[in-house]
Image (spheres, helix red, strand yellow):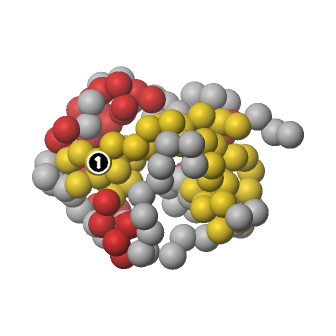
Amino acid sequence: MWPRVGGMRALELGTPNGVRARLNALVLAGRKTATTGLLAEYAEETEGLEYVGERLALLDDDGLAVATVEITGVTVRTFAEVPWEHAAAEGEGDTSLEEWRVGHRSFWEGIGTPVDDDTPLVCLTFRLVPPG
């Protein structure tokens, strides 16, 4: 089960020790409005998919909320089906869909979960909720 903070499910981007801080900074700057996860992780964690309108606590390396995001879209598709529009909305500086694919394959392989073109993914889009 994923962490809960302030009654909300948590969103932990990337991995701790640098990657998460960089991705969170992109969200806070308004450059990152999408993320992609492995569908298998939902089953492993016994979590349902996010839903449009759900608010999530964006967590830092210490498990503290740094912001709140609201889900604006949820799509399940295979790795090969991820469109450039979604990849670009991740805001990580990729200049092509192929660059996004190489980077994401490398990330998932690095954490011990290699992917292929048929691997099911969850593509989330979100907006930053202003404080207050």
- Quarter that holds the C terminus: top right
Query: To which quarter of the image does residue 126 belong?
Result: top right
Camera-nearest residue between 15 and 53: 53
Camera-nearest residue between 5 and 29: 5
Camera-nearest residue between 80 and 14: 80
> Residue placed at 36% from the left, 33% from the top?
87
Left/right of residue 21 with respect to residue 109 in the rendered view: right
In percent of width and height, residue 47 lies at 44, 69
Dot 1: few (<14), some (14–19), or many (≥20) neighbours within 10 Å?
Answer: some
Query: To which quarter of the image does residue 99 belong?
Result: top left
Find numbered disc 1 in the image and state the secondary structure of the residue it sits on: strand
Q: Is residue 94 visible?
A: yes
Three-letter code, disc 1: Val
Which residue position is annotated with label 1? 76
In percent of width and height, residue 88 lies at 40, 27
> Residue placed at 17% from the left, 41% from the top?
80
In percent of width and height, residue 120 lies at 23, 54
In percent of width and height, residue 111 lies at 37, 66
> Residue placed at 57% from the left, 56% from the top?
11
